[in-house]
Image (cartoon, rainbow, N blue to C red):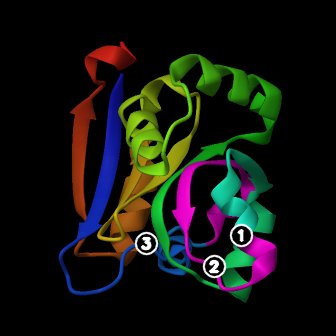
Amino acid sequence: MEIWSATLRGDGRPHTFLGRVFAALEGRQRDYDFLLAGVEACPTRPEYTFVNRGPVWLSGEELTAMVRREDFQWIWCALLAFSPEMGRERAEATLRALYAPEAPDVDSGRIRTQFGRTGAEFMIYGEDSTLTELLAVDPAWVRLFCSHEPDARAAKRAAAPEET
């Protein structure tokens, strides 16, 4: 399986704010269910601190509304986008079989390396506040993202050995 990715880093702008990512996705994230895992984030609103106690499910509409209200920084994150048809329980069971939860940086990195096995349509990965990566099975997501973020580096990669 091939995985497509677009990476933002090193352009002097903050990368781990979802408002920028959602703008590049033209709001299409609203049609998915998101499993937030491996999260360390910095919301200032107390009602959003739950994202740090993942894994947590949010609809794309809920996640988008939260980001509109407060576009806080995500230091580490693996935000997996699943089609609602897959079902949250099935997606969660698949993810549980891939890794045992640890610290956010370890979790998000492990999920990233296993992305092709998660069943997710795409994933937003944040690393140490310096990098944002969009990973997708369908290259159309990466093309859309790069059309709004010309500094993003697009790449195609074969699945890692643990993804085969």
The mark that comes first in sequence, 1 or 3, is 3
Any mark on residue 155, and which? none
Q: Amino acid at mark 3?
A: Thr
Q: Position of residue 11 (x, y in %)?
A: 20, 81
Give coordinates of residue 52: x percent, y percent.
64, 59
Above or below residue 107? Residue 149 is below
> Residue at the location (73% across, 87% down)?
69
Q: Secondary structure at mark 2?
A: loop
Per the model, the C-alpha gap separating discs 1 and 3 is 16 Å
Q: Which residue is mark 1?
A: 49
Can you tell which of label 1 and label 3 is closer to the viewer?
A: 1
User: Is 53 situated above or below 156?
Assistant: below
| Residue under numbered circle 2 | 43
- Residue 78 horizontal/vertical position (percent): 51, 49
Q: Are marks 1 and 2 in contact (CB under 8 Å)?
A: yes
Q: Which residue is mark 3?
A: 16
Query: Which region of the structure is painted magenta?
Result: 27-48
- Mark 3, Cα crowd under 10 Å, few <14 / some 14-19 / many 20+, is many
Tell me how far mark 2 sits from mark 3, CA to CA: 12 Å
On the question of residue 65 being in view, the answer is no
Residue 43 counted in the magenta span: yes
Is residue 58 rendered to the left or right of residue 111?
right
Looking at the rendered structure, the kind of residue marked 2 is: Pro
Residue 59 quadrant = bottom right
**In the foreground, 154 or 7:** 7
Please tell me whether residue 93 is drawn above or below residue 129 in the rendered image.
above
Task: Say which element carries label 3.
Answer: loop
